[in-house]
Image (cartoon, rainbow, N blue to C red):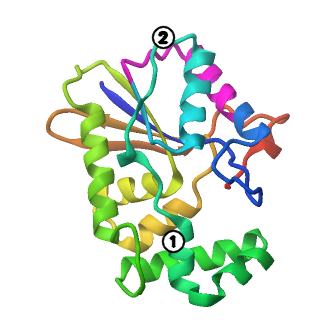
Amino acid sequence: MAILYLVRHGQASFAAENYDRLSELGRRQSVWLGEYFAERGIVFSRAVCGTLERQRQTARDILDTMGSTLTAEEHPGWNEYSGEALYKAYLGDEWANARAQGDVRSVYRTIKAALAAWSQDRLSGPLPETWSGFGARIAAAMQSACAGLSDDDHVLAATSGGAIGRGIADLLQAPAQTAIELNLQFRNSGFCEIFFSPRSMRLVSFNCVPHLERSDRRAAITYS
């Protein structure tokens, strides 16, 4: 059975000047996932990722660890929504202050509320895309990644939690709130398995981190 592996990037650099790069732990998470795939004998026929650095680094670390000769094809369709744009639109003039003073929990609460407002078309101001447009590009990226492959091919897609949450929720025909919840509970370097054929896609597993589920790695399960 052909399988699409949707992988969330490793831990990014939260609270750093440049969030869009993997932390040291994020690199280890990606390497451990590559080791897990290699131990299972998985061979990817195609690899894709978004154009964000944390997504590119994750794909490179996985493939390099597996000894794969593939280079992940970069496509902006796999990129995350702009959290900063949502944050600004939701908080207005207060956004910079709130971000500077906010801890992880307050940022989480704010982005959750902003996502809900975005999904209901209640945000004003310039935004890079609509909620429906976000869903359409993720669906198109998923279809493109699987196009033209055979029944026993495996595809790696290194992307982000919001993209995965939206893609899975739409696959299950679930409401926007489900997409938001799936987004915010997705673990770094976690993956989903989706069986695909020219006619359909079916979710098989969700938010899996078998490479981290051992006593010496429990602290390496992160969400940022």
Q: Position of residue 139 (x, y in %)?
A: 28, 51
- Between 158 and 223, the residue placed more toward the observer is 158
- Residues in magenta, as a range: 29-46
- First in sequence: mark 1 vs mark 2: 2
Residue at position x 71%, y 75% in the image: 99
Q: Position of residue 90 (x, y in %)?
A: 53, 84
Report whether 184 appears left or right of 71: right
Q: Position of residue 127 (x, y in %)?
A: 41, 73
Q: Which residue is mark 2?
A: 69
Q: Is residue 120 above or below residue 63?
A: below
Residue contact between numbered discs 1 and 2, judged by CB atoms under 8 Å: no
Label 1 residue SS:
helix
- Between 172 and 9, the residue placed more toward the observer is 9
Q: Is residue 40 above or below residue 163?
A: above
189 within the magenta span = no
39 within the magenta span = yes
Q: Quadrant of the N terminus?
A: top left
Q: Amino acid at mark 1?
A: Ala
Residue 85: mark: 1
**Residue 164 seen from this side:** yes
Q: Amino acid at mark 2?
A: Thr
Report whether 187 appears left or right of 161: right
- Quadrant in the rendering for residue 19: bottom right
